[in-house]
Amino acid sequence: MVKISGLLIIYTFTSMHRYFLELCFVGTAYHGWQIQDNAKAVQGEVNKALSTVLQTDCFVTGAGRTDTGVHAMQMFCHFDAEINESDADKLIYQLNSVIPSDIAFKSVVRVKDDANARFDASSRSYLYQIVQQKDPFLINKAWYYPFKINLELMNEACDILKSYRNFASFSKSGSDVKTDICDLKHALWTKNGGIILFNISADRFLRNMVRAIVGTMVEIGRGKMDLAEFRKVIESSDRSKAGFSVPPCGLYLKSISYPYELIPLNNV
């Protein structure tokens, strides 16, 4: 950048670096994270906000995709830019001023120049919410399912699920992936008041995987599938053998972990 003060020309330089941007969003109005033709996506809104505030074209790479209508409590994306790191709080404030109200930026972190928000992630965690009493305050935030389900049986299914690594049976048909192998770290059903919660963590997830697992386990909880049949479903590697995909409104990308520490610039 060049500043002219009287007859004196002052040159100041800011280096291009890579940054991780942390955000959250309600996905109801969006066709997922990834930019698509003729569809509103979260990634497009983030690109637009960054380009507006930094006054240069910016394109972010996200930690992963989310389906239409799915929410994120925590999402990371990376981008390259010249940023005055002393103004990190100001940058977040400015970004939140120009982004739609259903998206919020939380922090910006400088990382090594070859860091990748998608490929460096070591684990991802999802949450699925089911409500069994109609609640107008949770419309598009949870799946309303008023039927009795057996959580004890569903947790037995979780123990079975954790003994496998190939989850092709829960992957959307026609997905273009190199492998159906996932390292499942955690899966558990709990209840908090009138809300049933499913938490699941793995190093990676296949497309539609969580929603298909939830739908299949609900069939177990309803007595429509037993645990022996559940094992056969997993071992079949056939999506048509598994249960239905539950609605996206109850699904949240809960958190993403990296093998290195992420410290917001305003805390440095």
Image (cartoon, grey):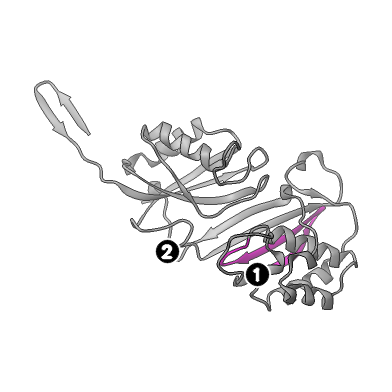
As drawn, the residue found furthest toward the front would be 174
The part of the image, by quadrant, that contains residue 196 is bottom right
In the rendered image, the vertical position of residue 267 relative to residue 54, given as above or below = below
Distance (Cα) linking label 1 and label 2:
21 Å
Q: Residue at x 86, y 44 (%)?
A: 134
**Res 260 label:** 2
- Image quarter (top left, top right, bottom left or bottom right) of the N terminus: top left
| Whole-percent x, y for residue 65 in the image | 58, 52
Q: Residue at x 61, y 69 (%)?
A: 180
| Whole-percent x, y for residue 97 in the image | 50, 31
Mark 1: which secondary structure?
Answer: strand
In the rendered image, the vertical position of residue 266 relative to residue 161, given as above or below = above
Q: Which residue is drawn at 14% across and 31% down?
A: 10
Asked whether the beta carbons under mark 1 and mark 2 sit within 8 Å of each other, the answer is no
Residue type pointed to by label 2: Tyr
| Whole-percent x, y for residue 13 in the image | 21, 40
- Magenta part of the chain: 187-206
| Whole-percent x, y for residue 226 in the image | 86, 73
Q: Residue at x 54, y 43 (%)?
A: 35
